[in-house]
């Protein structure tokens, strides 16, 4: 009788230990759930890079003695700029695993730069769509990944042949083709006679705090020509603009004025594209 009682206590104790271990990883506590660590991230997909990938993490507030697996889904909104799977990005696996003894797991997203825009971000919304039996996931938790195509800037590749399809500076408004060479400074370029014979323009390429490349043109002689009364006019201008490293297009806003009169004319925008 005494032996039976001892075994009875052992069985009860074993049941209690098993129940505690089960509670640790079956989320009996409703506060124990898995969710994305962040709500969004920017993924800069670099052109010509061998592999573009980013890791997105999910986490749990508890450590489990078993491996936990969750399925990742994609929520489609139909909005403009929504990225398309296998065109703008791909996911090697739609599951994320939190290893035993860990609180954090992650899955990878690979960016495809070919069809991404370098001017506007695209986006995709990831969600948790399932969890193992007995576990709790935050199914209302959405992670938005913004994808942007980025091309590496190389100053040595800037020289070449450039073209202005329709100029706002010259009276004809026709196409202008000219050469660009390196200037004296490390970030300077020389535009060879784009608007008038013998008049070259110097611009500087500067990277701003966001990582984008801007164009700066100090006040300088822009062109020499004749006005309606056949008088010789020396037109000066200063300018600022942007350089798109992917499309090889410079948008330069020029503010012209006549030499000596101090009167500025309406700014004009020149779209300058590298063609060779």
Image (tube, rainbow, N blue to C red):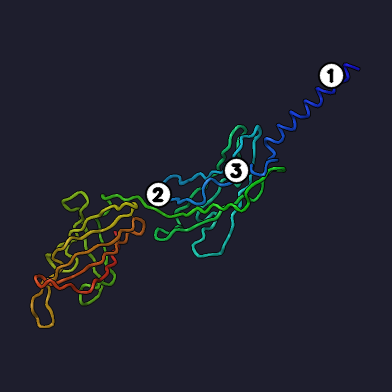
- Give the percent coordinates (x, y) of residue 85: 55, 55
- Give the percent coordinates (x, y) of residue 209: 32, 51
Q: Earlier in the sequence, mark 2 or mark 1?
A: 1
As rendered, which of 224 and 107 lies closer to the eye?
Answer: 107
Which mark's residue is nearer the viewer, 2 or 1?
1
Report the Cα–Cα distance between label 2 and label 1. Answer: 72 Å
Q: Earlier in the sequence, mark 1 or mark 3?
A: 1
Give the number of the disc on residue 200.
none
- SS type, badge 1: helix
As rendered, which of 197 and 116 lies closer to the eye?
Answer: 116
Which mark's residue is nearer the viewer, 3 or 2?
3
Residue 236 lies left or right of residue 11; in this view the side is left
Q: Give the residue displayed 11% in from the left and 65% down from the top.
A: 198
As rendered, which of 61 and 41 lies closer to the eye?
Answer: 61
Determine whether 248 is above or below 227 in the image.
above
Instruction: Locate the C terminus by quadrant.
Output: bottom left
Q: Which residue is mark 2?
A: 48
Q: Give the residue displayed 29% in from the left and 49% down from the top.
A: 154
Q: Give the residue displayed 54% in from the left and 50% down from the top.
A: 90
The quarter of the picture where residue 33 lies is top right
Give the number of the disc on residue 96.
3
Give the number of the disc on residue 6.
1
């Amino acid at each position: 009788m005494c032996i039976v009682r001892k075994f009875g206590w052992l069985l009860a104790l074993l049941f209690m230990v098993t129940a505690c271990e089960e509670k640790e990883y079956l989320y009996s506590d409703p506060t124990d759930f898995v969710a994305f660590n962040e709500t969004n991230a920017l993924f800069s997909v670099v052109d010509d890079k061998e592999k573009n990938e980013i890791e997105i993490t999910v986490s749990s507030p508890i450590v489990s003695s078993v491996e936990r697996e969750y399925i990742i889904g994609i929520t489609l909104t139909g909005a403009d700029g929504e990225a398309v799977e296998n065109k703008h990005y791909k996911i090697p696996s739609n599951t994320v695993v939190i290893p035993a003894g860990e609180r954090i797991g992650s899955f990878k997203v690979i960016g495809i730069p070919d069809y991404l825009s370098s001017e506007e971000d695209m986006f995709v919304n990831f969600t948790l769509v399932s969890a193992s039996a007995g576990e709790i996931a935050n199914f209302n938790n959405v992670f938005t990944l913004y994808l942007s195509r980025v091309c590496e800037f190389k100053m040595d590749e800037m020289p070449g042949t450039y073209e202005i399809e329709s100029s706002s500076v010259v009276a004809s408004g026709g196409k202008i083709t000219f050469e660009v060479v390196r200037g004296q400074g490390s970030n300077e370029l020389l535009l060879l006679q784009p608007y008038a014979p013998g008049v070259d323009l110097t611009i500087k390429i500067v990277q701003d705090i966001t990582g984008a490349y801007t164009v700066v043109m100090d006040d300088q002689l822009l062109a020499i020509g004749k006005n309606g009364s056949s008088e010789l006019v020396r037109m000066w201008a200063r300018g600022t603009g942007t350089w798109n490293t992917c499309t090889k297009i410079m948008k330069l806003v020029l503010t012209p004025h006549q030499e000596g009169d101090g009167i500025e004319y309406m700014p004009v925008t020149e779209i300058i594209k590298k063609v060779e």
